[in-house]
Image (tube, helix red, strand yellow):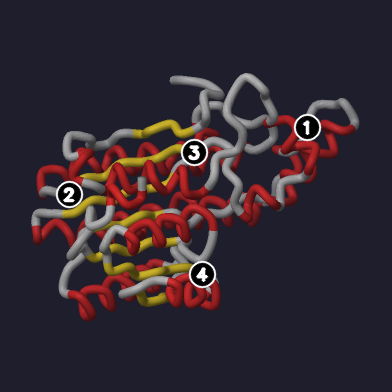
Amino acid sequence: MEGERAGRFDGRVALVTGAGSGIGAAAARRLAAQGARVLVADIDGRAAQAVAKELPRAHPLTVDVAQPAQVDEAFDELVRRHGRLDVVVHAAGVDDPAAKEWIAEALLADRPPEVTARLGDEAWRRVMRVNLDGTFHVLRAAVRVMAPRRSGAVVTVGSSSAFDTLVGYPHYAASKAGAHALSQSVAKEAIAFGVRVNTVAPGPTETGMAARTPAALRQGFADGRVRPYATPEEIADVALFLASEEAANLVGAVLLANGGRFTV
């Protein structure tokens, strides 16, 4: 399958956030294998360097998407290096391990989770800063670069949790629902300038984030009637489809990639 797609992004310049691991790293590898020059951006600079070293024509960047100045500087550096930007895959995001532990403890004790009343302001703001504010910072920077050239494709990584909200995880669900709506609103604006924006909304996926999920909570996601946890590569393939010319008529789409767990 990968051989059939070789050259799909020949001559393109791509930036991937959260590219030091998980879905972002898989997207960076897929883009490079299909001909793109990739800027591998992650808050963990060493992780970004490790992925970039694997790839031809790749360059690492240390970027915290919650910091608008860092995002703007990353895009400025990209333009200085390559003079153009064709594809953005925004995969950077965070979860809340403490809230997951509270949910798992409740499951094991056979009682309802009690999270909202215990949720501190900083925990709320951390998830919002990265998942929602970070999406805005990346979309804004991408539009600033792409719109003058009347060309480009942006894919944001949302979550099925925006639709099938997990009990006791309000901040994560809200951040991803907000990111979906943000991406769709920007999509309707940006298409007038030749820039397409779409979203892939994964269900449970085998990433580092999933590896930190308590066993009791992972078991709660188990359902023999649907596909198991997705691989990062499977989600990256959806993202690259949305970024490719094959999806030329998709604008503001939110594609569920949840293995059949639910539909909307």
Rounded to the nearest angstrom, the CA distance separating label 4 from label 1 is: 31 Å
From what the image shows, is residue 251 above or below residue 6?
above
Instruction: Determine which residue is flagged by label 2.
Output: 195
Instruction: Determine which residue is flagged by label 4.
Output: 43
Which quarter of the image is occupied by the C terminus?
A: top left
> Label 1 is placed on what type of residue?
Pro
* Residue found at x 49% / y 51%: 131
Contact flag, marks 2 and 4 (Cβ < 8 Å): no
Instruction: Determine which residue is flagged by label 3.
Output: 202
* Residue found at x 59% / y 42%: 171
Q: Earlier in the sequence, mark 4 or mark 1?
A: 4
Q: Position of residue 132 (x, y in %)?
A: 45, 50
Q: Secondary structure at mark 1?
A: loop
Disc 4 versus disc 1: nearer the observer = 4
Disc 3 versus disc 2: nearer the observer = 3
Rounded to the nearest angstrom, the CA distance separating label 3 from label 1 is: 24 Å
Q: Earlier in the sequence, mark 3 or mark 2?
A: 2
Q: Position of residue 157 (x, y in %)?
A: 43, 46
249 relative position to 159: left or right: left
- In depth, the one of 66 and 5 nearer the eye is 5
Q: Secondary structure at mark 2?
A: strand
Instruction: Determine which residue is flagged by label 1.
Output: 113
> Crowding near pointer 4: few (<14 within 10 Å), some, many (20+)?
some
Disc 3 versus disc 1: nearer the observer = 3
